Image (cartoon, rainbow, N blue to C red):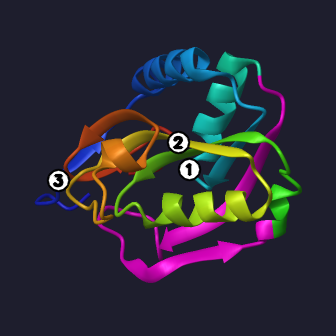
């Protein structure tokens, strides 16, 4: 990786500890009916949480904001959605949207809007890591997101990614 870039590398122990911590918080608030993982990186945390919570209904939706992989990858002007129909009918469901990282917050906001449009009765979010240095939503991460595993300032490399 570029020598002058700030990034945090997380291992599987970090991820499983975060999943356990978030699952405990979710359980205290009520186990959701459905988990929605944001493709690509959010699917792995969604599956970890689904197992920890005993939730068998897991969906995925592709909402991309970065144009490539790698540290400090360029972002598109707005998150791009592919196949929103993959969410199916969520009418009346309590839904937990899960993603590995939130940078600007735009991807999770777009995904939440899609889930509401699919009929959800309740929508919560679980983000494993917030990149606080990139956040640009009007609310602070703790106000805009329901469950946050950790916050860092800089790019995050997860164990399922290639540095």
- Secondary structure state at the residue bearing disc 2: loop
SS for tag 1? loop
Residue at figure coordinates x 46%, y 38% from the top left? 146
Q: Tell me which label, 1 or 2, sits earlier in the chain.
A: 1
Of residue 24 and residue 139, the one placed in the foreground of this image is 139
**Contact, mark 1 vs mark 2 (Cβ under 8 Å):** yes
Q: Which mark is residue 28?
A: none
User: Where are the magenta residues, as a range?
Assistant: 55-84
Q: CA distance from mark 3 to mark 1?
A: 20 Å
Q: Are marks 3 and 2 in contact (CB under 8 Å)?
A: no
Q: Is residue 38 left or right of residue 148?
A: right
Q: How many marks?
A: 3
Provide the residue designation for mark 1: 41
Counting from the top left corner in percent of width and height, residue 107 is at 50, 64
Dot 1 alpha-carbon crowd within 10 angstroms: few under 14, some 14 to 19, many 20 or more = some
Q: Tell me the crowding category of disc 2: few under 14, some 14 to 19, or many 20 or more residues within 10 angstroms, Cα based.
A: few
- Of the numbered discs 3 and 2, the one sitting upstream in the chain is 3
Q: Is residue 14 above or below residue 106?
A: above
Residue receiving disc 2:
160
67 inside magenta stretch: yes
Q: Regarding mark 3 in the picture, which secondary structure is present there?
A: loop
Q: Is residue 15 magenta?
A: no
Q: Quadrant of residue 31?
A: top right
Residue 4 falls in which quadrant of the image?
bottom left
Circle 3: is it few (<14), some (14-19), or many (20+) Cα within 10 Å?
few
Mark 3 sits on what residue? 6
**Residue 36 placement, left or right of 13:** right
* Residue 51 picture location, percent across and down: 71, 21
Determine the CA span between mark 3 and mark 2. 19 Å
Residue displayed at 60% across by 57% down? 112
Rounded to the nearest whole Å, what is the CA distance between mark 1 and mark 2? 8 Å
**Where's the N terminus, which quadrant?**
bottom left
């Amino acid at each position: 990786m570029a020598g002058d870039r700030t990034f945090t590398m997380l291992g599987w122990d970090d991820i499983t500890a975060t999943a356990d911590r978030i699952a405990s918080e979710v359980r205290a608030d009520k186990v959701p009916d459905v988990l929605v993982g944001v493709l690509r990186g959010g699917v792995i945390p969604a599956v970890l949480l689904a197992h920890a919570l005993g939730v068998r209904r897991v969906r995925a939706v592709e909402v991309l904001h970065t144009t490539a992989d790698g540290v400090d990858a360029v972002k598109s002007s707005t998150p791009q959605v592919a196949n929103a129909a993959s969410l199916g009918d969520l009418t009346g469901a309590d839904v937990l949207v899960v993603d590995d990282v939130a940078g600007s917050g735009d991807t999770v906001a777009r995904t939440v809007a899609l889930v509401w449009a699919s009929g959800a009765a309740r929508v919560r979010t679980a983000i494993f890591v917030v990149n606080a240095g990139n956040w640009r939503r009007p609310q602070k991460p703790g106000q805009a997101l329901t469950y946050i595993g950790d916050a860092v300032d800089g790019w995050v490399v997860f164990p399922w990614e290639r540095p």
